[in-house]
Image (tube, rainbow, N blue to C red):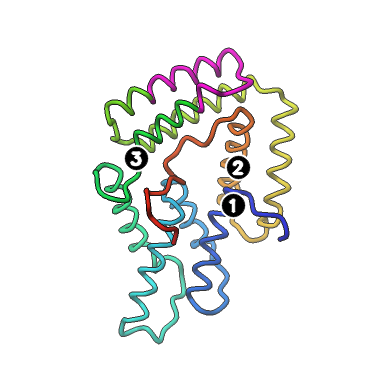
Amino acid sequence: MNDPPDPEAAYYQTIEEFFVSRRGDPLLLSNADWLLIRKWRTAGVPLRVVLRGITDALDGHAHSWGRDRKVGSLAYCAREVEAAHERWQRALGFGTEGEIDVGAVLLGFAGDLARARGLGPESARVAAELERELRRRAAEGSLRELESWLGSQEAKLLEALGREDPREAIVASEGEVDRCLAPYRERMPARVLAQVRSDAVARRTLEAHGIPRLSLFQVEPKGSPRE
């Protein structure tokens, strides 16, 4: 593909390419592998955390008694990915070097919502309420179940935008997403492709109003290199 991948599809493509390259020979991902990536994406596991887990799993395999046998499935890496995700989640709540400044992230989201453009009456009300709650949570350090809460609030805002945005803009955005995802139709299971499409449409809908995805998903810990 000559064009850069859709930002949502890039998560799946990067994991695929990284796993295949680290494994050492060509391997087509199975449907189960694609569904595992979808599980990580739905759970909000950042890309760098997945790559860290894959690295740990394959490095461990390279020094194990079974190193002469090829790793046949991405599922081999699932335990290490989960361990890496747990370490990342713990880093959200403590003042250790390299942590994510969650308060600053929430205030950033609040500022984006305050500056949002082209909102209708309902979506403007939802955005204003969410802005106030984000500022409150940032001040109080309310981190419990934060990612799932952000997801539910984003869904509420998207529902309001879906009712108020011009129909032609919605259709145009969905058409652009479908064109970007065309190369993946023969590679990904239908459930995975549907998830990518939904995420991609959500991203474009929010970006049209100057709002990012409301998630810690792509936030990098301070001072930490990408994997």
Amino acid type at circle 1 is: Ala
Which callout, 3 or 1, points at the residue further toward the start of the chain? 1
Q: Main secondary structure of the magenta part?
A: helix
1 or 2: tag closer to the N-terminus? 1
Residue marked by disc 3: 101
Residue 74 picture quarter? bottom left
| Residue located beneath label 1 in the image | 9
Q: Identify which amino acid the numbered label 3 is placed on.
A: Asp
Q: How many marks?
A: 3
Residue 101 x/y as whole percent: 34, 40
Q: In 3D space, how far apart are the residues under numbered discs 2 and 3 (Cα atoms)? A: 26 Å
Q: List the residue tagged with mark 2.
A: 200
Res 178 quadrant in image: top right
**Secondary structure under the numbered disc 2 in the rendered image:** helix
Q: Residue at x 42, y 41 (%)?
A: 216
Q: CA distance from mark 3 to mark 1?
A: 27 Å
